[in-house]
Image (cartoon, rainbow, N blue to C red):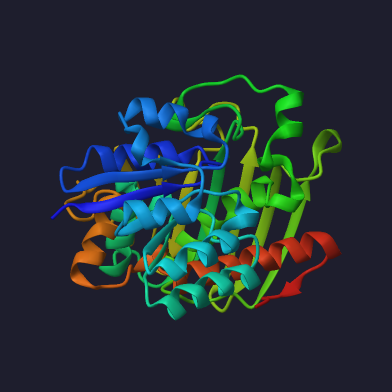
């Protein structure tokens, strides 16, 4: 039987991308979409030919009538906990689009709500499905560069208002920034909350679940904005220092032309290094035997690990909780580092890992 999927709250433009994955999956079916602002659903309704009787503005009505196997949630970051707590009592599995939450406290509310309802909770990080990053994880686990010592991440794009679903280009204005939740502190806006979780969650995956002991962060709030557009965080692990940098305002978007610095990861181990840049067809590896370095073609992802919809549907069919960056356990550590970075920037000092 097909997996029944509903999309609830279209505040984040990634909803369109995730629903496309559902629409293109022959083993899945979009049984409902819901948002209290109908205009935000218009393009998805048109793109995926969703009939009127599957379109809702009330969450409870959507869940009761569409009876999904799992729900995709894309609200503003500051409302993630609210929506998980609203959906969980309906006993439906949930996949929340990144980031995990606005704080560890809210992440714990989400974990508790899912546990109480006896359902699975997954946090989707799109970078998890980039073949290069998956290839790097495979090489790490195979011992290619020895024990991991450092993770360096640079992540971002021109800004969240420069594109919509399917990466359709837009031209933002100052007025658009004033209206958008991405630029409101109360709703979880800012590049740090939007992007650092990529680096810290994937970094935690690469680090094998290890946590740093302390965190130092600085942010930049240009032009009187109430949220940052640039942040740099250094995390101290037992193995050394790792760095996570976020940027709204790269010169180009990485999915069109890689900016400089390039968006991606550099991993340094005891016996080598790996560099993985977003969307690249190869990754660069150095080892003791080949210190000059060599290129490794990225792995071809295979079902059911090709995209988040396919993967989470398989988890549900098998009754197996999501693993790696999609798991609440790994994502929570990433959130701890994010919370610590926020506190560090506020206090202008190094802080112990919070949470």
Percent of width and height locating residue 243: 60, 58
Work out whether 97 lies above or below 55.
below
Please identify the residue farthest to the left as the structure is shown: 1
Work out whether 167 lies above or below 244.
above
Percent of width and height locating residue 191: 65, 46
Query: Which one is nearer the viewer's eye here, 160 or 201?
Result: 160
Q: Quadrant of residue 167?
A: top left
- At x 77%, y 69%, the residue is 350
Residue 255 visible, this angle: no
- At x 56%, y 79%, the residue is 238
Answer left or right for 313 relative to 111. left
Work out whether 328 lies above or below 190.
below
Q: Quadrant of residue 79?
A: bottom right
Task: Locate the N terminus by quadrant.
Answer: bottom left
Percent of width and height locating residue 24: 23, 37
- At x 65%, y 78%, the residue is 355
Q: How many marks?
A: 0
Percent of width and height locating residue 256: 44, 25
Work out whether 125 lies above or below 158.
below
């Amino acid at each position: 039987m097909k997996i029944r999927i509903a999309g609830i709250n279209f505040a984040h433009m990634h909803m369109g991308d995730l629903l496309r994955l559902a629409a293109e999956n022959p083993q899945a079916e979009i049984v409902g979409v819901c948002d209290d602002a109908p205009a935000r659903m218009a393009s998805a309704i048109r793109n995926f030919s969703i009939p009127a009787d599957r379109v809702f503005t009330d969450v409870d009505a959507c869940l009761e009538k569409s009876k999904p196997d799992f729900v995709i949630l894309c609200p503003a970051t500051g409302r993630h906990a609210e929506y998980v707590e609203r959906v969980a009592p309906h006993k439906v599995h949930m996949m929340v689009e990144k980031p995990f939450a606005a704080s560890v406290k809210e992440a714990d509310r989400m974990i508790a709500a899912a546990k109480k309802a006896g359902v699975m909770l997954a946090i989707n990080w799109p970078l998890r499905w980039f073949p290069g990053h998956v290839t790097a994880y495979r090489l790490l686990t195979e011992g290619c560069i020895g024990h991991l010592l450092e993770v360096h991440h640079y992540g971002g794009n021109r800004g969240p208002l420069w594109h919509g679903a399917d990466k359709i280009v837009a031209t933002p204005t100052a007025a658009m920034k004033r209206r958008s939740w991405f630029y409101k502190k109360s709703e979880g806006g800012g590049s740090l909350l939007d992007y650092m979780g990529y680096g810290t969650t994937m970094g935690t995956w690469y680090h094998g679940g290890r946590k740093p002991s302390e965190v130092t962060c600085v942010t930049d709030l240009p032009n009187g904005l109430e949220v940052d557009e640039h942040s740099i965080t250094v995390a101290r692990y037992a193995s050394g220092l790792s760095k996570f940098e976020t940027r709204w305002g790269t010169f180009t978007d990485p999915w069109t032309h890689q900016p400089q610095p390039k968006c991606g990861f550099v991993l340094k181990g005891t016996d080598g290094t790996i560099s993985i840049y977003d969307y690249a067809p190869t990754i660069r590896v150095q080892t003791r035997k080949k210190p000059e370095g060599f290129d490794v073609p990225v792995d071809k992802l295979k079902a059911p690990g090709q995209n988040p919809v396919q993967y989470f549907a398989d988890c549900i069919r098998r009754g197996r909780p999501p693993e790696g960056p999609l798991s609440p356990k790994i994502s929570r550590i990433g959130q701890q580092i994010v919370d610590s970075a926020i506190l560090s920037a506020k206090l202008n000092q190094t802080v112990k890992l919070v949470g």
